[in-house]
Amino acid sequence: MNKPDLTNLKRRAVVCGAGLMTAATLAAPLSAFADAAAAPGTNTGETQTTEVTIQSIADNKGQTTSDENLTFSTPTVIPFTAVADGTLTGPSADAVKIVNKSAFPVRVTNMAVAEKDPFHIVDDVTTSTGTNDVQFTVHGAKAAASVDLSHDTTWNMGYAGSGSDSISLDTSAGKIARVTADLKSAQKVATITWTLASGANAAA
C-alpha cells in the first residue's frame, strides 16, 4: 500500500472558547482559569477540540491526536484572568503549548477564531461599539475569523525530541468591554480552529 504524501497532509485542531467570570467585589481582580471539571477535548476524524476558558479554577490538561501520518497535542484550555478595567491576562506561555509528537517537522498554517454568542471577537475594543466585545492575541497572532500563518516561521515545529518540537502559546493584548453577559458562571467566548501540516513555513 502506498504511504500518504506527507507534504500535503493537513490536520485541524479546534479550540473552544469558554467562560468569563467577574469578581464578587469591584476591588478584587477576577481570577479566571480552566475548569477542572470541563469536558476534555474530543477527536473526530481530522479535528481536535480544546476548550478555552476564563474561570476561577485552573486545569491545563492536554490531548493528543495521532494517526500513521501526524501526531501532535494541543492544550485543553487557554484560561484568562480579567480585572475591573477589562484587561485579560492569559496563562504562562509554557502552560499552553502545541507539541509535535511526529518523527518529522510540522507547522501551523492557519488560526481561525469563531465567536460564541453573545461575545464578539474584535480587532480593538476601544474602537468597536458593540457589547461583550473581546480581543486577544495568541503567539503574536491577533484573534480573527481566519489568520494565515503559512508564511510565519515562528509557527514551525521540529521533529519530536528535537528541542524545537513545541510552540508556547503566549497570549497578550486581551481586553473585554461593555459586558452585558452574566459572568458569574463560565461563558463560552470563542472557538479557535488550528490547521497543521507537515513541513515548515517559509518566510514570505
Image (cartoon, grey):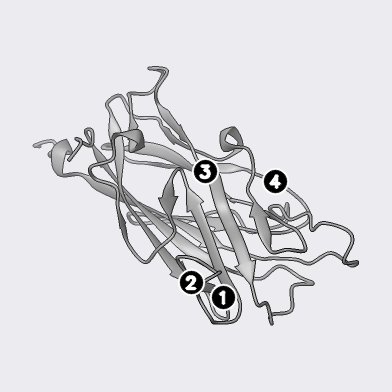
Disc number for residue 115: 2
Q: Amino acid at mark 4?
A: Asp
Taking the spot 50% from the left edge, 41% from the top edge, the residue there is 169
**Which of these two is toward me, 148 or 98?**
148
Instruction: Give the alpha-carbon distance from disc 4 to disc 1, as whole Å.
Output: 23 Å
Q: Amino acid at mark 1?
A: Phe
Mark 3 touching mark 2, by CB under 8 A? no
Choose the circle earlier in sequence order: 4 or 1. 4
Q: Which residue is mark 4?
A: 59
What secondary structure is found at the residue carrying circle 4?
A: loop
Disc number for residue 119: 1
Foreground label between 2 and 4: 2
Choose the circle earlier in sequence order: 3 or 1. 3
* Left or right of 185, for residue 149: left
Residue 4 in view (yes/no): no
Taking the spot 13% from the left edge, 36% from the top edge, the residue there is 3
Rendering quarter of residue 181: bottom right
Choose the circle earlier in sequence order: 3 or 2. 3
What secondary structure is found at the residue carrying circle 2?
A: strand
Mark 1 touching mark 2, by CB under 8 A? yes
**Which of these two is toward me, 100 or 140?**
140
